[in-house]
Image (spheres, rainbow, N blue to C red):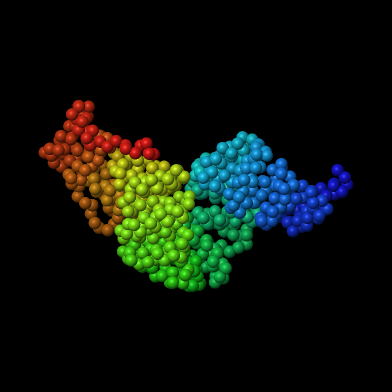
């Protein structure tokens, strides 16, 4: 190395040291000066791409990384850096060919494999391929915490939360003071409902004085989880670290327009998370209502707050309030697709289907490339029995949906509403071939098998596959009804108990249990549960009387599913009510001794085999 080459190398090393201290404006001129002296200097060009990435100047970083690729096409650095920047910009499809080329060049380079796994996990149809790649990175570099962190990120994408938690513990064992690992571990633990552990991880990360981006990651995670009450002090610590107001509390935005818009964004994130996810949801929703009230008091014209207020009214079943809030927003041209949907559903509840159809058509006009609005229009058309128009809208919605499972589920729901059960089944199954754990599709297909095909066994298997927690209890209650009819009474009772104890029990949960049990009597062992549900309902209406006809239906249901002990239990109850009941007497003899040929033949006439087993 000549003296000039040595001087250039020293300059590059100084620039790298400055960049690591976050002093990008001092480091960049040094690197550019080196490149002016030697345009082919690898260290200067590669580190310039790295510096531009650190400085969040990603377009320039990608452009510089492509220069590295052009000059050193057999080196992974340019491909790696360009792919990393594109991934950070959520352009995984563009990053994929670049990182694949890096893997071809160096198939055993740990950082390359880690990024490859992360890019694959960002592309839903390629997610299953990501885990073997992440496992290979762990195998090659078992002492690098980033390998375990990458594995955890992939497992999160697969919703294997406990496995992800284990992987993050392994990363922290290797480096317990890495702020990034602590934050990632906190995110996973929060998903698992491990509040204390999540709190410890986030607090430890903030004590390490991480970069502003890392602190924002903590705040963003808490916001997207509904700002859980047990972690509000952690959120405050993060706000203090960034020297920003704590916008999770009412009134902290004052009348500042920019802060009010930021607070509206946080409030929406809170409401979205609090509606569906965790036991602390009710508290988060109550705080969110207070936030919205304070924002509207500060600025009654604030559109994001008005939109959220309308959505909250819809979720609270205050449909007249919803319409009053929504109509002016629609007239002003401020309505979002979500507002149109919420308003149309509210009008349906108010049985104002003509106005619902008008708004659904308007939504489709304003958002012509939206599968969601086409499905909304099709839904109302189906409600009005306008069959051909509904099918046409469903076809348009399907074409616009692409591979979006939620959008495709909405299309399938139109077929279900029209009574086209085979078409609906095919549509749900197509979704589940793309995404095996898609919650709504699993539940909707399960209910289709239960109601339209009278196949409770298939319905049970599908709903059992749902991984997301059921904080409203309605899904668990449905599973309880299915298991009750299958004769799995111990499981059914546990399901009903869990549904009643749900942290954010849905309004339909307890009435649904009552209706389901009363349809079949209920059998004596479920009477205390029914009485408890009637008491919870609290409207003064007593439970319906148990009749022999209802119990007879329960007995036949048990025979249908081969639950002979439970059938015998119901028959004994009938005979207690009417000892001379001929039919129950005969059936009790059949159930008591099913091995007798005539008895077996009689049972076989009622028993329904699992006709859809090969489909699932």
The vertical placement of 65 against 612, above or below, is below
Q: Is residue 247 visible?
A: yes
Q: Residue at x 29, y 39 (%)?
A: 487
Q: Looking at this rendering, what residue extends furthest in the right direction?
A: 3
The residue nearer to you, when weighing 231 against 146, is 146
In the shown orientation, is residue 90 left or right of residue 23? left
Q: Residue at x 40, y 64 (%)?
A: 361
Q: Position of residue 107 (x, y in %)?
A: 65, 37
Q: Position of residue 189 (x, y in %)?
A: 52, 46
Which image quarter: residue 584?
A: top left
Q: Position of residue 61 (x, y in %)?
A: 69, 53
Which image quarter: residue 130?
A: top right
Q: Looking at this rendering, what residue extends furthest in the top direction?
A: 596
Q: Residue at x 56, y 37 (%)?
A: 132
The residue nearer to you, when weighing 106 against 346, is 106
- Quadrant in which the C terminus is drawn: top left
Q: Looking at this rendering, what residue extends furthest in the left direction?
A: 580
Q: Position of residue 438 (x, y in %)?
A: 44, 47
Q: Residue at x 70, y 45 (%)?
A: 77
In the shown orientation, is residue 37 left or right of residue 433? right
In the shown orientation, is residue 211 left or right of residue 488? right
Q: How many marks?
A: 0
The residue nearer to you, when weighing 508 against 415, is 415
The vertical placement of 140 against 44, above or below, is above
Q: Is residue 161 visible?
A: no
């Amino acid at each position: 190395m000549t003296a000039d080459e040595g001087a250039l190398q020293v300059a590059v090393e100084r620039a790298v040291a400055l960049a690591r201290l976050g002093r990008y404006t001092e480091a960049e001129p040094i690197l550019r000066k080196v490149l002016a002296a030697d345009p082919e200097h690898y260290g200067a060009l590669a580190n310039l791409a790295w510096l531009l990435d650190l400085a969040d100047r990603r377009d320039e970083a990608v452009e510089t990384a492509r220069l590295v690729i052009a000059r050193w096409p057999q080196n992974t650095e340019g491909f790696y850096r360009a792919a990393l920047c594109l991934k950070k910009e959520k352009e995984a499809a563009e990053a994929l060919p670049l990182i694949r080329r890096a893997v071809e060049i160096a198939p055993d380079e740990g950082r390359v494999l880690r990024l490859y796994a992360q890019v694959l996990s960002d592309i839903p149809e390629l997610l299953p391929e990501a885990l073997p790649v992440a496992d290979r990175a762990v195998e090659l570099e078992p002492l690098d915490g980033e390998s375990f962190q990458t594995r955890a990120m992939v497992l999160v994408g697969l919703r294997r939360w406990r496995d992800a938690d284990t992987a993050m513990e392994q990363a922290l064992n290797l480096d317990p003071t890495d702020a990034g690992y602590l934050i990632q571990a906190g995110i996973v633990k929060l998903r698992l409902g491990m509040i204390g552990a999540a709190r410890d991880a986030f607090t430890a990360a903030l004590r390490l004085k991480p970069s502003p981006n890392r602190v924002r990651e903590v705040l963003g995670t808490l916001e997207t989880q509904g700002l859980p009450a047990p972690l509000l002090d952690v959120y405050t610590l993060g706000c203090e670290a960034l020297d920003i107001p704590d916008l999770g509390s009412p009134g902290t935005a004052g009348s500042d327009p920019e802060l009010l818009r930021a607070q509206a964004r946080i409030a929406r994130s809170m409401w979205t998370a609090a509606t569906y996810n965790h036991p602390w949801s009710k508290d988060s929703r109550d705080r969110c209502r207070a936030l919205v009230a304070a924002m509207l008091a500060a600025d009654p014209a604030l559109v994001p707050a008005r939109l959220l207020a309308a959505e909250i009214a819809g979720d609270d079943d205050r449909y007249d309030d919803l319409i009053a809030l929504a109509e002016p927003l629609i007239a002003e041209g401020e309505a979002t697709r979500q507002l149109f949907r919420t308003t149309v559903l509210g009008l349906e509840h108010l049985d104002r289907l003509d106005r619902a159809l008008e708004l659904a058509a308007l939504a489709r006009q304003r958002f012509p490339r939206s599968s969601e609005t086409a499905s909304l229009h099709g839904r109302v058309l189906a409600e009005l029995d306008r069959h051909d128009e509904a099918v046409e809208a469903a076809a348009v919605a399907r074409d616009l949906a692409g591979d979006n499972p939620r959008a495709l589920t909405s299309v399938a729901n139109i077929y279900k509403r029209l009574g086209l059960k085979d078409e609906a089944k095919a549509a749900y199954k197509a979704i589940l071939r793309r995404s095996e754990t898609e919650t709504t599709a699993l539940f909707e297909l399960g209910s289709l098998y239960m109601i339209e095909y009278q196949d409770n066994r298939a319905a049970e298997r599908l709903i059992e596959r749902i991984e997301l927690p059921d904080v409203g209890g309605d899904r668990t209650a449905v599973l309880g009804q299915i298991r009750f009819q299958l004769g799995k009474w111990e499981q059914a009772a546990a399901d009903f108990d869990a549904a009643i104890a749900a942290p954010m029990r849905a309004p339909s949960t307890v009435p649904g249990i009552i209706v389901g049990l009363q349809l079949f009597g209920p059998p004596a062992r479920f009477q205390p549960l029914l009485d408890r549900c009637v008491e919870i309902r609290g409207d003064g209406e007593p439970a319906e009387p148990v009749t022999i006809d209802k119990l007879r239906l329960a007995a036949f249901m048990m025979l249908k599913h081969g639950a002979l002990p439970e059938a015998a239990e119901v028959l004994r109850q009938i005979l207690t009510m009417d000892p001379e009941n001929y039919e129950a007497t005969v059936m009790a003899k059949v159930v008591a001794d099913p091995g007798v040929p005539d008895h077996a033949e009689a049972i076989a006439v009622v028993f329904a085999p699992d006709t859809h087993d090969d489909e699932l």
